Image (cartoon, helix red, strand yellow):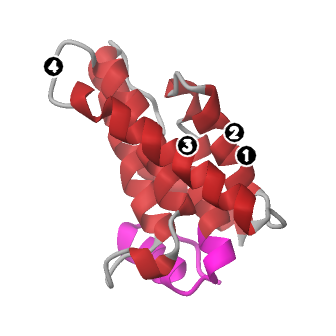
Amino acid sequence: MPIITNDRDLRDVLNGLTDIQQRIIGASFAKSVLHLSRNEWVRRSVEIAQNPDASEAELQDALKAAKGYAAKTYTDCGKDTDWLAQADHFVAASAAAALTSTDRLAQKTNPAWAAAVHARMAKDCEAMQEEEGEMETEAQRQYRIVNDSL
């Protein structure tokens, strides 16, 4: 498998994964920004999403928790005064995306890609709050996650 170095390659690889692989990789993307979450249920949702043996009931409960928290924190988006509150929202949205079944997403996306995009938004919000940026971007971190996982 070639080494992923750009979003086109990342999307191509993600599109070729099974539903379970997409969920697990998507959860890995959410986990990389989990330090920005203020909610224990979102953290637990990411754990469940990463478990290849999670039951359907566990997955549905985790999705409900992450999606509910993302909806609750949605009103914080657009407020330019609390970037970390916005980051918190995007972490929950990333976890929810990872847990969403492929038949519930738009045709040209998949759970892992949706989780990746939300995780990047969370990092962008964190960057707005912080004075210094990181050496590795979230996109580069995601390429590494997939390269290391597959």
Q: Is residue 102 left or right of residue 132?
A: right
Q: Give the range drawn in magenta.
A: 1-22
* Mark 4 and mark 1: Cα distance apart in space: 30 Å
Q: What residue type is labelled 1?
A: Glu
Q: Nearer the viewer, mark 3 or mark 4?
A: 3
Q: Mark 4 points at which residue?
A: 80
Q: Name the residue under label 3.
A: 65
The residues bearing labels 3 and 4 have C-alpha atoms spaced at a distance of: 26 Å
Question: For the residue carrying disc 2, how many other residues have a C-alpha within 10 Å: few (<14), some (14-19), or many (20+)?
Answer: some
Q: Where is residue 72 in the image (x, y as percent from the top left)?
A: 36, 32
* CA–CA distance in space, label 2 to label 3: 9 Å
* Secondary structure type for disc 2: helix
Q: Which residue is drawn at 58% across and 73% down?
A: 3
Residue contact between numbered discs 2 and 3, judged by CB atoms under 8 Å: yes
Residue 150 in sight from this viewpoint: yes
Residue 23 falls in image quadrant: bottom right
Res 44 label: 2
Residue depth check, mark 1 versus mark 3: number of the one nearer the observer = 3
Circle 4 packing at 10 Å, graded few (<14), some (14-19), many (20+), is few
| Discs 1, 2 touching: Cβ within 8 Å | yes
Q: Do the residues labelled 4 and 1 touch (CB within 8 Å)?
A: no
